[in-house]
Amino acid sequence: DLQEVDLAITGMTCASCVARVEKKLAKLDGVSATVNLATEKARVSHPPTITEDELLAAVASAGYEASVIT
Ligand code: 9UX
């Protein structure tokens, strides 16, 4: 089953940043994400095979910093 996690993301300043992050996350198998620029958060849906650390690493590789909102 898909799991959902919310991420806090820093460093996004324009709509293209949002698109970059969503695209990077979507490259992971089975992952989809909706990023909200105003709140600097992302809602991410992922299969159990993709860990939260992998999600954070994907965001970092796009050039932004992310942490899991618990
Ligand atoms: Mo917009 Mo974001 O010009 O890294 S793409 S600031």
Image (spheres, rainbow, N blue to C red):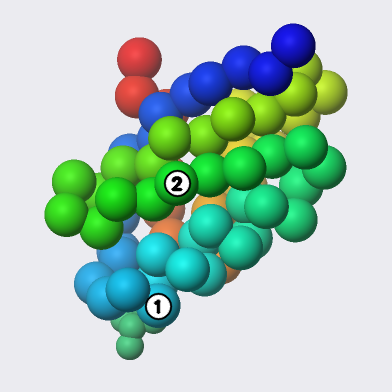
Q: Quadrant of residue 24?
A: bottom right
Say which residue appears at 40% left-offset and 77% top-offset: 16
* Extreme residue in the left direction: 38
Query: Is the CB–ligand 1 distance for label 1 below 8 Å?
Result: yes
Query: Which corner quadrant of the image does residue 56 belong to?
Result: top right
Name the element at disc 1. helix
Query: Residue 62 occupies which quadrant of the picture?
Result: bottom right
Q: 19 left or right of 69?
A: right
What secondary structure is found at the residue carrying circle 2? Answer: strand
Q: Residue at x 74, y 11 (%)?
A: 1
Q: Residue at x 17, y 54 (%)?
A: 38
Quickly name the residue at label 2: 34
Residue located at (34% from left, 24% from top): 69
Within 10 Å of disc 1 (Cα), the crowding (few <14, some 14-19, many 20+) is few
Quadrant where the C terminus sits is top left
Identity of the amino acid at label 2? Thr
Q: Camera-side residue: 34 or 6?
A: 34
- Residue 9 sits above or below residue 21 on the image: above
The amino acid marked with disc number 1 is Ser
Does residue 66 sit above or below 62 in this rendering? above
Residue wearing tag 1:
16
